């Protein structure tokens, strides 16, 4: 079935950086596209970024483009989100999610989320 | 960007009721439409993919239909564990936008 565990969340000041990790287990990591989705407190879901199974195809939401970097290390079964120039409105729970297959497929497995709070 | 809308934004239902939630895309997304259920404090769970395919392990009282721009999620007989927020999402093109959600509450 598969399991995803996010880590790296915490409190940061505006302008600072954080790096999130998502450890995958129970499935063959390197054949699936992976996503980051965030949810601000009390709000809906916002897709943030996707990386293809081999890391060659990457896309971002406009709200994070140029500030966040998604990457993966298939040898470590781990997905990353490098978050730079953090803003107050980046405060959210960040979920990693595994696609059913490729980039354009539904999000089949979700982690439990890690909270990022940006506050001065 | 493709905009997703949902209606209603909230609804009250009793156990055993039939419930339908509507999702509309701002342009055709063929059948690149998924439905998720989210309970408070939990991550979303995939219910329906490709507009009408039931995810493994999801009860058969859930069903999805539609193509193009108009989609529906139907719960044939609402159970106590179904009270949650439901989101539609398009994966036709990036950014992969979600609808604003529909909160299903107990009447």
Image (cartoon, rainbow, N blue to C red):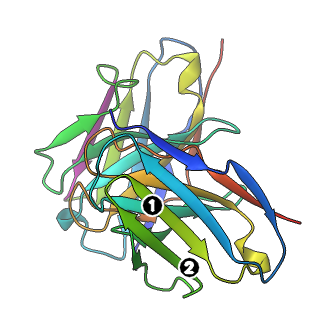
In the picture, measured across the screen, residue A25 lies left or right of residue A5, that is: left
Among the 4 quarters of the image, the one containing residue A39 = top right
x, y (%) of residue A33? 24, 57
Chain to which mark 1 belongs: B
Residue B64's place in the image compared with A45, above or below, is below
Which numbered disc flags the more N-terminal residue, 2 or 1?
2
Q: Position of residue B13 (x, y in %)?
A: 81, 68
Q: Residue at x 54, y 68 (%)?
A: B73
Q: Which residues are magenta?
A: A68-74
Which quadrant holds the C terminus of chain A?
top right
User: A69 and B47: which one is in front?
Assistant: B47
- Quarter of the image for residue B94 reads top left
Q: Which residue is mark 2?
A: B62
In front here: A15 or A108? Answer: A108
Quarter of the picture containing the N terminus of chain A is bottom left
* Observer-nearest of B34 and B6: B6
Is A45 magenta? The answer is no
Could you classify mark 2 by the number of other residues whose Cα lies within 10 Å: few (under 14), some (14-19), or many (20 or more)?
A: many
- Tell me what residue is drawn at x 55 percent, y 51 percent: A113
Q: Which residue is mark 1?
A: B71
The answer to whether B105 appears left or right of A24 in the picture is right
Main structural element of the magenta stretch: helix, strand or loop? strand
| Subunit bearing disc 2 | B
């Amino acid at each position: 079935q598969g399991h995803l565990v996010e880590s790296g969340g915490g409190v940061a000041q505006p302008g600072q950086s954080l790096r999130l990790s998502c450890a995958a287990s129970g499935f063959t990591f390197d054949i699936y596209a992976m996503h980051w989705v965030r949810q601000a407190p009390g709000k809906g879901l916002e897709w943030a970024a996707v990386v293809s199974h081999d890391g060659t195809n990457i896309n971002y939401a406009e709200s994070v483009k140029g500030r966040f970097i998604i990457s993966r290390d298939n040898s470590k079964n781990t997905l990353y989100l490098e978050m730079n120039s953090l803003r107050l409105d980046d405060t959210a729970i960040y979920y990693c999610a595994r696609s059913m297959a490729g980039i354009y497929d539904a999000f089949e497995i979700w982690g439990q989320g890690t909270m990022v709070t940006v506050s001065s | 960007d493709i905009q997703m809308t949902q209606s209603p934004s909230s609804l009250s239902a009793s156990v055993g009721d039939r419930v339908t939630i509507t999702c509309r895309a701002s342009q055709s997304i063929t059948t690149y439409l998924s439905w998720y259920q989210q309970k408070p404090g939990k991550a979303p769970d995939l219910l329906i993919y490709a507009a009408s395919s039931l995810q493994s392990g999801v009860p058969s009282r859930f069903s999805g239909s539609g193509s193009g721009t108009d989609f529906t999620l139907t719960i044939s007989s609402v159970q106590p564990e179904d009270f949650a927020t439901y989101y539609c999402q398009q994966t036709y093109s990036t950014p992969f936008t979600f609808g604003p959600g529909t909160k299903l509450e107990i009447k």
